[in-house]
Image: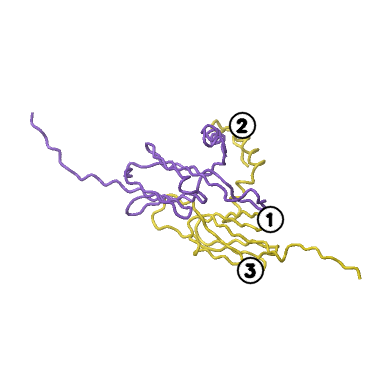
Chain colours: A yellow, B purple
Amino acid sequence: MVLDFNTLYTFPGRFERLFEDFFKPQYAEGRRMAYPPLNVSEDETAYYVRSELPGLPLDALDLTLTEKSLVIKGERPTEQGKYYRQERPAGFFQRVVVLNVPVDREAVRATLVDGVLTVVLPKCAQCAPRKISIDVA
Amino acid sequence: MTDTAETKTAATPETAAKPLPRVSPATDILEREDGFYVYMDIPGVRREDLKIDINENELLVTGRALQGASDKETFLEVQFGPGEYVRAVSLSDRVDRENIAANLKDGVLTIHLPRLEKAAPRRIPVNQA
């Protein structure tokens, strides 16, 4: 990092910023990491994978559930015209969510509302831990 | 996030109750034959939670994205969250302010800013005193 001490340089402010970035980088870093951003959560009945995918209809998305992973694939289109500013990412993207847990593959559902994709992966009833009683012979 | 943005959030009464992190949405601005187009990625914002205000020379878009998750869920990985999208776009004089149209579809806000029809050239008659 280059420190310059000219008159336009707000030294204390910059210093605080540095500290701020150091102590709470998670939000900004998370946004920069990979596209699209993913949230993974679970409750008692299912796992949820959510992703921000604005501007894509559900049929333009390719969701693949393989033996061990969920693959989200697609392409964001570009608009035609003379660009003055382009910040929205465009092009192909792919994210792989590795599933190390058994899920009920037949009951997986995906919805896309307001550009937020939600994939619900229900936990399978047969895979729930069971007690095995040991009979003494 | 800068200090000014945080103080602003605290000052507004409706956001003071539930402060959300402010996010500047990714925006494309482009020009076509029929005018300017602004595209903003605002995933998770419903139509009712979106506000577009035009001040003198500024178009301000504010929208709140709330998380669809229930309280029972525990998160294993978080890369995005609820937030308030705020973005101002300055308008040029060539924009026809009366006919600005906005459309929200699949989390993308499209604003069409039509060009102002040029006034037809006319001759000014000179009156004799």
What whole-number distance in Å separates the C-alpha atoms at marks 2 and 1? 48 Å
- For label 1, the residue is A44
Q: Quadrant of residue A73?
A: bottom right
Circles 2 and 1: CB atoms closer than 8 Å: no
- For label 2, the residue is A12
Which chain is home to disc 2? Answer: A
B93, above or below A97, in the image? above
Query: Tag 1: Cα neighbours inside 10 Å, few (<14), some, or many (≥20)?
Result: few
The secondary element bearing badge 3 is classed as: loop
What whole-number distance in Å separates the C-alpha atoms at marks 3 and 1? 23 Å
Q: Quadrant of the C terminus of chain B?
A: top left
Of labels 2 and 1, earlier in sequence is 2
Of labels 3 and 2, earlier in sequence is 2
The secondary element bearing badge 1 is classed as: loop
Identify the residue at image location x=20%, y=45%: B120
- For label 3, the residue is A66
Q: Amino acid at mark 1?
A: Glu
Circles 3 and 1: CB atoms closer than 8 Å: no
Which chain is home to disc 3? Answer: A
Query: Tag 2: Cα neighbours inside 10 Å, few (<14), some, or many (≥20)?
Result: few
Identify the residue at image location x=48%, y=49%: B46
Identify the residue at image location x=39%, y=56%: A81
B57, above or below A33, in the image? above
Q: Nearer the viewer, mark 3 or mark 2?
A: 3
Towards the viewer: A76 or A98: A98
